[in-house]
Each structure stands twice: as structure tokens, then as C-alpha cells.
Amino acid sequence: MKTASPFLELEAAPARVRVWFDGEPLHLPPGANLAAALLAAGVAVFRHTPVSGAPRGPFCLMGACFDCLVEIDGVVRQACMLEVEEGLRIARPHEAEAGRAPV
Amino acid sequence: MHPCDLIVVGAGPAGLAAAATAAEAGLQVVLLDEQPRPGGQIYRDVDRVAALRGGILGKDYAEGQALTAAIRRDGIAHLQGAVVWAIEEGIRVSYTRAGQAAQVTAPRLILATGALERPMPLPGWTLPGVMTAGAGQILLKQSGVLARRAVLVGTGPLLYLIAAQMVRAGTPPLALVETQTRADLMRANRHLGGALRGWPYLAKGLAMLAELVRARVPRHTGASDIAIDGEGRAEAVNFRSGGKARAIACDTVFLHHGVVPNTQAARSIGVPHRWDAAQHCFNPVVDAWGGTAVAGVFLAGDGAGIGGAHVADLGGRIAALKVAEELGRLSADERDRRAAPLARQRRQQFAVRPFLDAAYPPYAGALAPADATLVCRCEEVTAGDIRGYAKLGCIGPNQAKAFGRAGMGPCQGRYCGLTVTALLAEANGRTPDDTGYFRIRPPLKPVTLGELAAMEDGVSDAAE
Amino acid sequence: MASDYAVIGGGVVGLSVAYGLLRRGLRVAVLDGGDGSYRASRGNFGLVWVQSKGMNQPVYARWSQRSAAQWADHAAELAELTGRHLGLRQDGGYDLHFSDETLDQQVANYEILKAKLDGDYPYEVLGANALKREEPQIGPKVAGAILHHQDGHANPLRLLTALADAVRRLGGQVLTGKTVTGVTRDGDYQVVCSDGTTVGAGKVVLSAGLGAIELGAKLGFRAPVRPQRGQVLITEKLPKMINRPSLVARQVDEGGIQIGATNEEVGFDDRVTQPGLSGLAAQAVTAYPALAKAQLVRSWGALRVLTPDGLPIYQESRDMPGAFLVTCHSGITLSAAHARVLPDWLEKTAAAPDLEVFSEDRFAVS
């Protein structure tokens, strides 16, 4: 998941903080746009749709498409509208509760 | 409670210019914007980024700093990270900020909600790795994140801009797959006279094309039968061009075939919209000031009709002058004296549009997608489903939404609305105007039930 | 004569009646409105509901029970005909109470009705603990619930779609985008539309919801119906968290939690309001605290079609025999009865139900 990101970062981030995505630690630049930072870290699939289970990732990055939804503290939110903060625990929406697949 | 004369929604060029102009005239302004920092999409994060990557992004981008500087003044409360989810009579605007719902009221409202990428439904467009070209630009602008192996698909000047920026950043796109044809360009030449009045714009376009030629970025024009292929993520773009089937392996695809007004907020309060055949989209009905049929509500910027950043800036100023006059801060003469040169510049800026509309028409294969193509990304409804609902008597998108859920997901139809209208119009042999559009209702953006419920105990005021 | 029946109104009520007539081999034309018409069929809560209905009129309680009892067959038949599954669940529903006082009062009311129904009113009272076992997500402020075993819910939009499909499959003629302006009689009835369309039929059913306010008089009806706004909320799709439906919230078959509904006398204003949204959200969060973190993705205001006493009207016109008014605000619950029983009443067969108490004569000013 984290290896061989299809994206590169133009500048080396001066600092990194630890967050978790789907239980895995990632080191991302604090204050960075969360969706962009996850993409740069090699995360491609942000969620699975509740309709067919199809994988989805960021599409518009401007808060309009809702394809970059992730779950943080039990609330499903748009990753592209959030910033990286130390210690964030990020999950794919409604997949953290083991065995509780979307209806 | 803080007095507020004017609420401006959106801190892109139109909203920034409107807020600054209104405050200069002595109005108390609340500027609501979803983003953490001003600039909108075109000048996204410009205050932080211009120094970092100004060379790659170009001079036009850095110009946005003049607009963001102008709102740092008395009379403007800029509420960053404020997501507007309801607008009601009064004019009462409900929004969420930092996990709390709040409201602000004012006698006037300027909506400067900008543009959305025109939906480009084609096979595979929902795969991870497929994004809008605007998203590609946002990644580069705000985050300095660049796709290593990207193909740009579609048509229009934005495609050349992002390609040129990628070249400057040292990672050119693998190829441009362009849908416009030579015939489109021939047709567009009829409008060249008008376009020449917008000469600086054309000159920039030619300079960008020259950059792509120098970098030897392959360009395939007249592309058709475009499909994105991949197992769980984008792996290749397949298309036909020059009479041949082609495939380009890649990791990332950036789609673009024009932008359209983001009409959600305006529609939610009943601003009438009309189909624009030249631009293949609905435009709100506005007067020369941006005024609408809804009392006290003005529109400015791309949300009032696509014109680009300079037109948006001018439209924001013009609307603010009108509001200032209506609220007694400017005489009608003063308003007209100041608005006249702005309106003149706006006409000049618009002169290039007919040429661009004709030269870079939307990709036909995405305006009327094949039956199996998903059109509603949220609810996973296909073009064939929509055509089927037409056969069941759906003459408009609201009945089709009830029948098949297109437009019911969290994006509220932003990325399927125009396609659903077009498919129903075609299937029923009716015009887009007669077919109509989704009824847009609150919440304009999702809001948690907890945030809503907390408002029962008293609504906090924005400016407190 | 082109058709045996012209049905004015293509919502759930009109389509259910049309479907019922078609499945008996009658020829039917349906005249439906435009995309933006007021449509209770697109805005309702989707309950197939018995409890609390007909508290003062046991015949209505029985009529609702009769329809609920036929719903499974109705849904199965539509699914077989159209391939569209209606998501019907009939394993009971709750009337949630936030205080023991209101719960006790409602139980007393139900006992009176139960006696009038010869004991056919299968409900049980769940205290807070018993309810918590059935609904683990229920909140501490819920005092208890009445669980009525004849209650259930379905996907109302899929019912609408399936009926629209079924009517066409059975040869019904459906004209959409029509505004009916009048009905004339010259032997047969002629239904006249604003665009010049006329539809001839032996009989006419007026099931146009709020459209009956204007059209009723032209057919000799009082049609005393009025709009009442109901705002409804729906959340993002969530993992299963609510088992049985209630008037407060239900989890639809697609996963969203539907939350209802306001009762507002605001005329023909079908907008949603922030106070409406907040009030409903607060009640839902009190009932199911975990919902506080759920995202509201959609809301709507729909106009109920209400009579002065809230009961349906089934009335044949005295001035124009063969013209019928059919209107109610429980079109989902009554869909099965309208498809399977009402045609006997329209056709005056030996099996016709006695619907005399639903005559609009009950509203006559004496």
C-alpha cells in the first residue's frame, strides 16, 4: 500500500507526523491536505462504495465529489477537506468495525 | 450580535473581490469559505504557495495574492473552513465550522461558489487513479504533489495549462488524449475576430502549446471511444485516434472537458436557470449586476456563468457596488461611474469565449454515454438505467431520481445532474429546459445529526 | 370508448388502483403530472403501518389491517411481474415513548380499540430493558415502546417504480406531463388536459392527491383535502443499526436511516427548514444516540394529502355516476388494498367492501 506511490512530492517535507490509515502507520507532513498526503504516501483506495463495494479514491479534491470519504473518530468526512494532524486514526468508512460490512 | 450587511459565500476571485469592494464602501461583510485559506480553486492557498512554487504555477497564479491581501481589513469577518449547508429566507445562512453548526443573517447575499468540472462519464472513470484535471492542478498547487505517470484526457485550455505546469515541474504527462477535432477548430475560426480582442489569452495558450512541443509530450487529437482500463485502479487509457485503436499504460488519468457553473446553492433557493446550448450547461438567470429573481441574492464569478478568474473578479466588484448602492452606501451615480469600466473590461474578457467554446467542445462520448457507463458515481446508476426510466415515463430528473436514486448520494447530483438531464432530454425528445434539473435542497453538504441537533439548544451567531 | 377507466393521478394511489383494475383485465389509462408536481409518493416515510390508525374509527383500523395482511402477496406479485423487489419487512414496528405517562396513555387507548376489533390487535409493551434487547442502539431517554406485530415497512420509491412498470406491462396507457383541466360527459367521460389531449373512458377515478382540490368540484366532489408538510431526513448509508421501524426512524433496505417527520400546516410550501431539520435530528439522536455521528445527506419536505379527520375518502359522484374520488394519506400502507380490494368496490361486485364510513358525506355541514 505504501510502496511505489504513483505520486511524487516536489519538496521534501521539513517535518512528518505519525497517523494511522486502516491500522497502518504513515508519516505525513503536518498541516498538509489529508487527501493529497495520503495519495503521496501510496494510498490509492480511500473507501469502498456502500452500493457495490467498488474501490474509490479522490476524484475532484475540491469537496464536491465525496469519493475521498474516510472515517475519523466515527464520523465519515471528506479527506480533501481535512489537514494532517499528529495521531489521526483514519479508516475506510464503516470498515473499522470488524464484520460490520455495509448493508 | 455583530451587525452584518452582506454575506459572501466563496473566497475565490469573485468572493474576495466582492467582499473587499463591499467593505471599502463601508459594509460589514461575513465571508464564508470551505477552505482553510483564501483563494478558491484557481488561487488555492496562494499566500503560502506562491513563494514555494510560483515558477511552476506561473504569473497568473501569483496574481491572486492581490485579491487575498485585499480582504485583510476592517469590515470583513473571513470565516475559513465554514461549510454552508442551508440558505433560507431572511437571508439566513446555516453552516458548519470546526464541528459546530452556526448561522449568520444579512439583508444581502452574494454567492460566489465557482465552477465544477463538467461531468465526464466514460468507462472506468470511477477507478481510483482517475481524477479531474482540476484535481491534478490542486495537488500540484496546494501540496506540490505530482503524478509520475499521468495521461491527460479531454479537451480545453486547462488541459494545456496543467500539462505545461507538469513539464515545468520536471515530470511531463505521458500523453495528451484530446477529443477536439480539426473540424472543431475550423468552426471556431469563425469566432477568431472576437477572440483576437482577447489576444493575451490566446497568446498564453499558444505559448503553453509550444512548451508541450519542446518537451515532446505526445498529443493525440480527435480521440474517441475512450475507456479507462484497470483492475481495481487505473492502469491504461484506451481510445481511437487517427483511425487506430491505441492504449497508453499509466497510473493516473486526469479528465477535463470544460467547466460548468456550480449551481447547487443558487438552485436551492430557487434562482431560475436556463440551458446554454453553446456551453452545454445550465446558467443562472442574472442581470448585469449579478442580481437574481430571489430578493437580495446576487451571483458572481463562474457560478454566474463561466468566464474565468478575471471575469469573476470583475463580477464580484460589480455585484458589491450594486449591494452598496442598495444599502445606501453609494449613490446610483457613483455606483454606475465605478461599474462602467469594470463592465467594459468584462466584455473584453468574454470576447474569447465563443472561440474557445467552438474549438474545444465537450467530448460527445461523455455527453451521451454508453448504456453500461456509470453516470451517478455515488449511487452507481448507469446511463442505460436512466434511459430505462425514460421508458417508464420519467420526463424529468426528479422522477428518475425517485425511480433509480441518481443524485441521491452525498454529492447531491453535482457529478451526474447534467448527464441525467441530457439523457432524459434525448430519450424523451424534449429540450434540456423542458426536462429540467434536480430539485436541490438542504443540506448542500452533509452535516452530522449531532451538529443539527445541537442547534435545538440555541443557534450560535457567526460573528460572536 | 378507449378505456374502461381513466385514472387521474399517477402516484402510488392512482397506480395501485390502475394496477388493480388492469390485473382484472380492464382497460386503463393513467394521466400523470409533471416532474415538478407535488408528489407525496416521492416524499413519504415508507411504513406499512397499522398501530394508532383508526383510534376513533375501527373500520379504518380494519381496512389498514386488511391491506397490511395482503402486502406480502402484493409485493411478491409485483416483484415477479417487474423483477423489482420492494424491500418489504413485516416483523413489527415500534411506537417509541420518552415517558411512562405517554406510554401508559397509549396502551389504554390501544386496549379500547382492541376491544372494538374483537381482540385482533397484536401488540406488546416493551419496557426500557426489553427494548434495549431488541434494539441495542436505543438511548437511555427512551422509556419504552409499543411493539405492534402487524407493522412493517417497505421501500416506497421501489413500490412507485414497480407500479409504474407493472401498469405498463399489463397494457395500461400512461400519459405523463399532463395537467388535467376538466372532465366532461357525453355518454363516456372525456378527460381534458391543458395541452389539448383528451382521454375517453367509461369511468373515472380521481386520485390526484392535492390536485383534487381543484378538480374535485368539476366532478361533483367536495374533496376537502389540504396539504400538511412533512420534513424527512435521510443519512448516509450505515451498517445495520436499527432492527425495526418506528415513527421516529427506520433503516431503509439500502442502509440509510430515514428520520421523520414534521407535521406543519404551511399550505403549499414544501421547503425544508433549519428548525425542522434540527428538531427531527434532536429527536432521532435522543432515540438512537449513535446517530449523532451520522451524516445527513438528504432531506425533503413533502405535502401530505389530509382530510379533516385524517381518514381516506372513497366516494362515487352523485352528479356524475361512474366518477370516483379516491384519496388518502397512507398510500403505501393501503397500496395492497387499493390494488386487490378496491376494484371490487369500483366494479360493484358481490365482494365489494363496505366503505360507507369513508364517504365524504361525513363532512357535510348539517
Image (cartoon, helix red, strand yellow):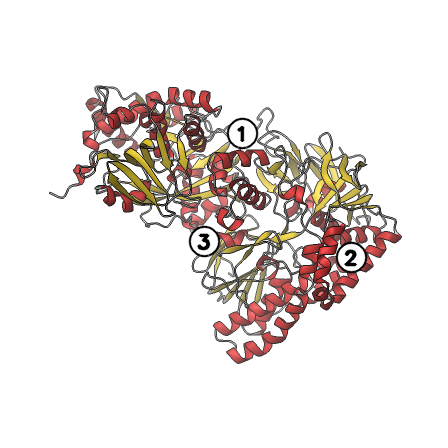
Quadrant location of the N terminus of chain C? top left
Examine the rendered structure and indicate whether residue B270 appears above or below residue B420.
below
Residue where numbered disc 1 is placed: C239
The numbered disc on residue B459 is 3
- For this view, does B251 lie left or right of residue C350? right
Q: Is residue C178 visible?
A: yes
Residue type at tag 2: Leu
Quadrant location of the C terminus of chain C? top left
Question: Disc 2 sits on a residue from what chain?
Answer: B
Determine the image quadrant of residue C101.
Answer: top left
Residue type at tag 1: Pro
Structural distance between the alpha carbons of marks 2 and 1: 44 Å
Of labels 2 and 3, the one closer to you: 2
Of labels 2 and 1, the one closer to you: 2
Of labels 3 and 1, the one closer to you: 1
Q: Are marks 2 and 3 on the same chain?
A: yes
Residue where numbered disc 2 is placed: B57
Q: Secondary structure at mark 1?
A: loop
Circle 1 packing at 10 Å, graded few (<14), some (14-19), many (20+), is many
- For this view, does C155 lie left or right of residue C321? right
Decide which of C72, C181 is in the foreground and name it: C181
Examine the rendered structure and indicate whether residue B343 appears above or below residue B407.
below
Dot 2 or dot 3: first in sequence order is 2
Decide which of B183, A84 is in the foreground and name it: B183
Q: Secondary structure at mark 2?
A: helix
